[in-house]
Image (tube, rainbow, N blue to C red):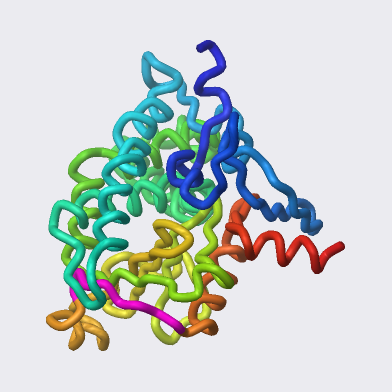
């Protein structure tokens, strides 16, 4: 068990298993990898994709694997039986039935928010764009508290203080997953209105996913991502595939689409628009960190065309 938490998944393996094909020894998944501008397609076990070695290791806690244990025990387990129950309810229900309860939304909001906060893109954005301005402000406040003789002596040292990338990452994780903050983010999603999309073209054009599977879009904007669009803006739309056949979309009740909330909140809607499915798939592939995942038979078709 020494290496059990070395290859740390940035997307839950239980989630990835749903997009793969179960074999005798492992669940295999069609994988597209973009690395150094080169695209490769291959079949891999879900154990072997969607991870970064020791990515969540920390130095500020007694357990260096604290966050990996947290995700494994608190978040990733929700992608097992809890999500399976939601998918089963959707699959067995009639068209236009209300299929999402408040507890279902609570489960999915935790998975979605955690996924948004744990990915390298979010952590990198904070450390590169938000951290420098916050650090500058803190340094100015510290300097303003010092008497002139101390400021004169230590001003240059204060100005040159920089925290390591590791320390910055730890600050991001501690802030994002502090219970009050995490619960607040989840409530924002729960207060939106949710639609469950059932892909009627599952056999030809299944929903794909990636190691950055939550698509955050803004109405009228071309940029995707959490920090480009935010969680609370009325124009924000969130799309998250649960399986090759089922996805949830979350819209603001305060936005233009809020007029549909009373009619559609929590309902199952069959979608048979190939262009819509393809557009969502393309965006999820584009925003992948390293790996995107393409269920069969679509993977087989793509692989055949590349031969």
Q: How many marks?
A: 0
Residue 253 versus residue 4: which sits nearer the camera? 4
Identity of the residue drawn at 66% across and 51% down: 31
Identity of the residue drawn at 34% across and 66% down: 248
Looking at the magenta stretch, what is its main secondary structure? Answer: strand
Residue 133 versus residue 192: which sits nearer the camera? 192
Residue 269 lies, in percent from the top left, at 30, 77
Residue 92 as seen in the image, left or right of residue 221: left
Residue 68 versus residue 157: which sits nearer the camera? 68
Residue 154 versus residue 297: which sits nearer the camera? 297
Residue sticking out furthest to the right: 307
Residue 184 lies, in percent from the top left, at 19, 52
Asked if 59 appears above or below 275 in the picture, the reply is above
Identity of the residue drawn at 56% across and 27% down: 54
Residue 125 lies, in percent from the top left, at 50, 54
Asked which quadrant contains residue 70, the reply is: top left
**Would residue 134 be counted in the magenta stretch?**
no
Task: Decide if residue 170 is in sight here.
Answer: yes
Task: Decide if residue 227 is in sight here.
Answer: no
Q: Which residues are magenta?
A: 265-272
Q: Quadrant of the C terminus?
A: bottom right
Identity of the residue drawn at 38% across and 50% down: 137
Asked if 26 appears above or below 104 in the picture, the reply is above
Residue 72 lies, in percent from the top left, at 38, 31
């Amino acid at each position: 068990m020494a290496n059990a938490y070395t290859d740390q998944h940035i997307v839950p393996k239980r989630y990835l298993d749903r997009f793969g094909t179960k074999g005798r020894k492992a669940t295999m998944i069609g994988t597209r990898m973009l690395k150094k501008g080169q695209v490769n397609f291959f079949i891999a076990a879900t154990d072997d994709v969607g991870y970064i070695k020791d990515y969540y290791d920390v130095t500020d806690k007694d357990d260096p694997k604290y966050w990996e244990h947290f995700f494994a025990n608190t978040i990733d387990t929700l992608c097992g039986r809890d999500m399976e129950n939601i998918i089963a309810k959707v699959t067995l229900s009639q068209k236009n039935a209300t299929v999402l309860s408040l507890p279902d939304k609570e489960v999915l909001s935790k998975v979605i928010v955690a996924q948004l906060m744990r990915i390298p893109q979010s952590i990198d954005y904070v450390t590169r764009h938000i951290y420098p301005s916050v650090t500058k402000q803190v340094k100015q406040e510290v300097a303003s508290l010092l008497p002139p003789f101390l400021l004169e002596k230590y001003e240059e040292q204060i100005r040159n203080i920089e925290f390591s990338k590791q320390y910055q990452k730890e600050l991001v994780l501690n802030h994002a997953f502090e219970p009050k903050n995490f619960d607040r983010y989840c409530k924002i999603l729960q207060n939106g209105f949710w639609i469950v999309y059932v892909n009627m073209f599952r056999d030809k054009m299944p929903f794909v996913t990636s190691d950055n599977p939550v698509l955050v879009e803004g109405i009228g904007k071309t940029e995707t991502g959490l920090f480009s669009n935010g969680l609370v803006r009325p124009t924000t739309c969130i799309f998250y595939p649960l399986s090759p056949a089922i996805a949830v979309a979350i819209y603001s009740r305060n936005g233009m689409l809020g007029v549909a909330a009373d009619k559609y909140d929590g309902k199952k809607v069959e979608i048979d628009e190939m262009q819509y499915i393809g557009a969502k798939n393309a965006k999820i592939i584009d925003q992948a960190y390293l790996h995107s995942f393409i269920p069969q038979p679509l993977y087989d078709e793509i692989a055949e065309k590349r031969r």
